[in-house]
Amino acid sequence: MQVTEQQVNEQIEQCITLARQFYNRRFVVPQLHWFHRGTNAGYAKLQSNEIYLNHVLFEQHPKYYMSDVIPHEIAHLICFTLFGRVKPHGKEWQSIMRQIYQLTPTTKHHLPCEHLRRVRQIDYMCQCGIVPLSMIRHNRVRKGLQSYRCKVCGETLSQNGLQEG
């Protein structure tokens, strides 16, 4: 099934229209953005009324995006407009998913994404040997925000094997 960006925008507008009709209230159509990395299907930025969709997963599973992911993200925006800051997948959001979109509320997708996951790791050292750290943890160490200890010996990990300060 080939889905165009125009069809995605029409689905977004349809989801907003269903909410308008249900609540008899105006909702602003959000701006659509695409991202190309990671395993999240999508996310909503509440204050700026934007939705972000994973273009790689979308191209592989367009039908699922149209039927589930887009209503899921729009429901977050509707929920924020109606109720303000509440639990992201709380009872208010679940109610919107069930009542407006007739969907079972789910918090995670089950799309295959093993092929997307490319976590780069950096080797750190302790007296036990090499301990790999994720790029996120490595950047925290590099910026001086965090230090990590070996789970076995308790020594502070260092990238070059030399203890700092």
Image: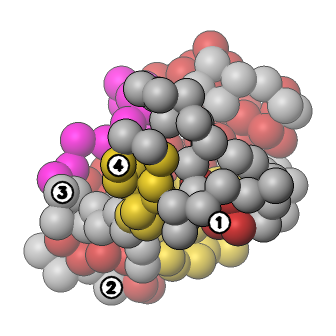
Residue beneath the point at 82% across and 55% down: 165
Amino acid carrying mark 4 in the image: Gly
Q: Nearer the viewer, residue 18 or 156?
A: 156
Q: Nearer the viewer, residue 101 or 63?
A: 63
Q: CA distance from mark 1 to mark 3?
A: 24 Å
Furthest-top residue in this view: 91
Q: Which mark is residue 139?
A: 1
Q: Which mark sits nearer the N-terminus, 3 or 2?
A: 2
Q: Which mark is residue 114?
A: 3
Asked if residue 162 is positioned above or below residue 59 in the image, the reply reads above
The image quarter containing residue 162 is bottom right
The image quarter containing residue 139 is bottom right
Q: CA distance from mark 4 to mark 2?
A: 51 Å
Q: Which residues are magenta?
A: 99-112
Amino acid carrying mark 3 in the image: Glu
Q: CA distance from mark 4 to mark 1?
A: 21 Å
Residue beneath the point at 43% across and 66% down: 122
Residue beneath the point at 57% across and 20% down: 95
